[in-house]
Image (spheres, rainbow, N blue to C red):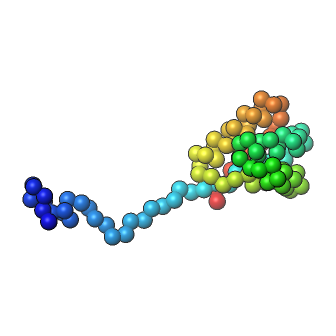
Amino acid sequence: MKDKYGIGLDEALDVRDHQEVKSPPLYKVFLLNDDYTTMEFVVHVLEKIFHKTHVEATRIMLHVHKNGKGLAGIYTHEIAETKIAAVHKIGQQSGFPLQCTMEKE
């Protein structure tokens, strides 16, 4: 079938049978244990910044406390950077040295 300009539909469109869509790389965001940040504050951060339930936030906080670091979430690079910046900002504003890192998955 041709349009009014004499171009066939298949000619006008660059039709590809298989098109691969790559997902962006993901990054794990970890909270790091320190000797000054309170457990309650870590739970608060996990609830507010990472949108964890109270039970899940408490579980992650205990893991951080016992193991030195704990997984807060997995995100695209930009979102991971934003979450880390938010953790550092709220920690600084509250007088806690809470730190976050990210690692490529």
Above or below residue 61? Residue 11 is below
Residue 41 position, x and y percent, is: 84, 40
Q: Residue at x 84, y 47 (%)?
A: 33
Residue 18 position, x and y percent, is: 37, 69
Q: Give residue 13's quadrant in the image.
A: bottom left
Q: Is residue 14 left or right of residue 74?
A: left
Quadrant placement of the N terminus? bottom left
Q: Residue at x 81, y 49 (%)?
A: 54
58 and 19: which is toward the camera: 58
Residue 36 visible at all: yes
Residue 101 visible at all: no
Quadrant placement of the C terminus? bottom right
Q: Give residue 83's quadrant in the image.
A: top right
Q: Residue at x 9, y 55 (%)?
A: 5
Q: Is residue 83 left or right of residue 4?
A: right
Q: How many marks?
A: 0
Q: Residue at x 73, y 37 (%)?
A: 88
Above or below residue 60? Residue 44 is above
Above or below residue 92? Residue 12 is below
Residue 65 position, x and y percent, is: 88, 51
